[in-house]
Image (spheres, rainbow, N blue to C red):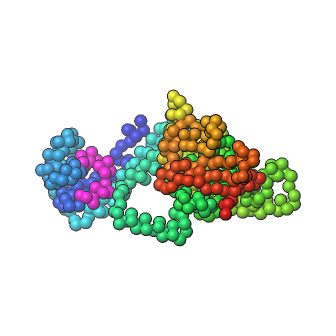
Amino acid sequence: MIIKNLSENYLPNDPQAEKALLSSIIFNPSIVSQVIEKIDPEDFFWPENRAIYKSIVNLYEKNLPIDLVSITNEIKHLKLERELDFVGGFEYLASLLELVSVVHSHLYYIDIIKSKSIRTKIIKASLETIQDTYNEEYNINTILDKAQRRIMEISYTSKSQDYHSLSDILASVLENIEIMAEEGVVGLPTGFEDLDKMTSGLQRGDFIVIAARPSMGKTAFAINLAYNIVVKSKQPVIFFSIEMSKEQIAQRFLSLESSVPLSKIRNATLTVQDMDRLAEAISILSEQSIFIDDSPIISTIDIRIKSRKVKVDKKQLGAIFIDYLQLIKGENRQDSRVQELSEISRSLKALAKELNVPVIALSQLSREVEKRNDKRPLLSDLRESGAIEQEADVVMFLYRDDYYNKDSKKANLTEVILAKQRNGPTGSIFLYFAKDILKFFPTA
């Protein structure tokens, strides 16, 4: 293996800095809490120094004194004596007392050790990626995903404060309250005031499911949301269209912006006025950061890789849209489609948290809806998997009464049913749906 054959001489490390930090701790145990906050045992390159530091961490956690005697006993307790055998045993530990420790110098040594550790991890991650690349059993997307994960894990595990004081949290809460009072939302605005009032906007890190029976306008509603997010928040969105081609999705955006009926765009039965409106709409849409992927076969790994790329390229990402959930290919062979969808749902929720964006996935509903007199959807109608409901932070249903009742008094009205909201109320709002241009409008 490449990594095993790599000599220590070629990996970044500084044995003197490691010894100096350990010496600083022995001379001044009060600094241990500062060191532990930034340095893990694995950050020490040399086994003997790692063993000594592990014993110090254990003593600190047990609230025991940290001195030469206690460290020696703890090393024996942890059975780490062998790590010191190669450098002279416990005499090596005693030699740390011979080093001169300068007040506050430990901060300097921490920076050196942490920097060397991160560089070593990056090198090892790169070498593991090289090994994966030579492994013909891995497909390219798996290799890319593993490579990205390794680097991101290094970034996440670079020791930083992972807890916050209540005072800091309350300051953030107050800031959100002020934003709510001033702007009405703290998340990404949907463009629909009534919906924003109920949700406070689409929240970062949320997995949001929009479900309906076919022909209810799921894709149109998602396109409206995507467009409103880009225009109002000035942040990019990526739209994964597994069912429709990128040209079909682009036509829908064009109809939405120009108010030229989609049927006229499809059939090219356009007037001069229509062409003028389309030209203006193209000019406006071309300036928006909307990205479309129409891969007919796509997995959660593919979605993760492409979404990360947009976030890196554009330095930010507003939201991820997926049309639709049941068409995503599972990564691992499962005994049933239900298990596969459970894995997909968990992966999409993890992606929302990882990239700190709302992930909005469209979903089909089961045919059970059609068997009831009241055809308004229920959470139990989510097709094939209860895990979708479990993992989702928000579940919205779309329902049009005029689809089932031709004499309905609610013609062209879409009921957006907020059936689940982990951190907010449930209920319904109504939007007017202009089917010819696939655009939703507030009813008031």
* Left or right position of 74 against 50: left
The one nearer the camera, 285 or 424, is 424
* Residue 107, image x, y percentages: 29, 63
The one nearer the camera, 78 or 381, is 381
By secondary structure, the bulk of the magenta-drawn segment is best described as helix
Q: Is residue 19 visible?
A: yes
Q: Is residue 24 visible?
A: no
The quarter of the image holding the N terminus is top left
The answer to whether residue 124 is above or below residue 135 is: below
Stretch of the chain drawn in magenta? 32-54
Say which quarter of the image contains residue 80: top left
What residue appears at the point 80 percent right and 50 percent down from the top-left corner?
Answer: 263
* Left or right position of 266 against 294: right
* Residue 249, image x, y percentages: 71, 49
The one nearer the camera, 211 or 76, is 211
What residue appears at the point 34 percent right and 63 percent down from the top-left corner?
Answer: 166
* Residue 239, image x, y percentages: 63, 50
What residue appears at the point 40 percent right and 40 percent down from the top-left corner?
Answer: 3
* Left or right position of 292 against 176: right
The answer to whether residue 329 is above or below residue 112 is: above
**Magenta segment includes 33:** yes
The quarter of the image holding the C terminus is bottom right
**Magenta segment includes 332:** no
The answer to whether residue 259 is above or below residue 368 is: below
